[in-house]
Amino acid sequence: MKSKLEKTIPILPLLLLIACSSLTAEKEEGIVEVEYTPLSGIGQERGVMRRDPSDVIKVDDLYYVWYSKGEIAPGYDATVWYATSPDGLKWTEQGMALAKGEPGSWEGESVFTPNILVAEGKYWLFYSGVSRKFEQPYNPDSKIGIAVSDSPDGPWERLPSNPALINSDNPEDFDSHLVDDACLIVRDGKYWFYYKGRQLGKSPAETKMGLAISDHPQGPYVKHEANPVIPGNHEVLVWSQGAGVAALIGTSGPEDITRTIQYAEDGVHFSKTHDVENVPSAGGAYRPEAFSDSGKGKRIEWGLEISREEGSLPFLQRFDIKEVK
């Protein structure tokens, strides 16, 4: 049976029809619903803060995740820890992956918000650091560094070129105050480094997303001329989807993009494909195609996010995504 499009415009070339169909499939809007499940091992624990989960990778038969751990609600007095799991639900905390930097350094007061890149047979741990001690009112000065290891279990060696990404020295730029929250994919043979930035004088709710690209996992990373690529979002979660890049937008930013999935075939110019009900908070996802450069990535299905309950420090729980319509 012919489609309505074929009946209405029979003279269109077959290749044009296929292209239009593909474009429609990527831009078709729907609704995504999220479900949550408690975790053992890295879930709620009295007096312990766990937050900012990295994206999840699988090495042999184990899933790995890295996260900020400390004793206060923000991540500004934390170190980076990691855990493993056979199923994504029962986790075993393995220990500290990265300690604070040298006193007085750009990372001397806290290291937090980790994420992972697997490339060139090595593991690259991206993380944020601050030099200022946490006290109210607080004015963070975060930058992003990289540590490398031959094993997901470490030991991790900080790159001498750190920090790998810093805030702009132009007050008018969206990231002139700070940069934070790395999320990496491999695309077109290069390393695409999405991050969030805040402009001087702006509030955390006015954070935006930027992009920097490098030919090598260790950098140098060059910020994209189209920055900011998304005009909002306090957390950064992107993944390879087909020929393009998709991004999950949380609760911060302009009203028309919050609680949505955005898609950009070129990885730069994003538009909405789905609304998200019960959106995850600062999620990290299992993204099996993120570093493959295969052009075959699919929408994420699960990951970890930050949960908060009254009287409790932040903790980690699992989220699972399903399409409602």
Image (cartoon, rainbow, N blue to C red):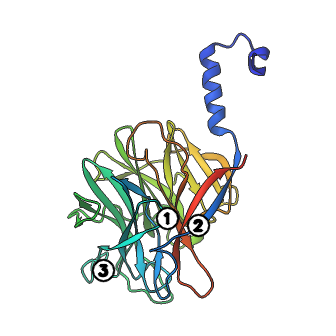
Type of amino acid at the residue the image marks with label 1: Leu
Disc 3 or disc 2, which is closer to the eye?
2
**Residue 71 in the figure: left or right of residue 8:** left
**Residue 23 in the figure: left or right of residue 289:** right
Q: Position of residue 138 (x, y in %)?
A: 48, 84
User: Residue 20's image quarter?
Assistant: top right
- Identify the image quadrant of the N terminus: top right
User: Residue 124's image quarter?
Assistant: bottom left
Type of amino acid at the residue the image marks with label 2: Thr
Q: Residue at x 34, y 82 (%)?
A: 109
Looking at the rendered structure, which numbered label has been put on residue 108?
Answer: 3
Q: CA distance from mark 3 to mark 2?
A: 35 Å
- Of the numbered discs 3 and 2, the one sitting upstream in the chain is 2
Q: Tell me if label 1 and label 2 are in contact, CB under 8 Å.
A: yes
Residue on which disc 1 sits: 89
Q: Position of residue 302 (x, y in %)?
A: 54, 56
- What kind of element bears circle 1? loop
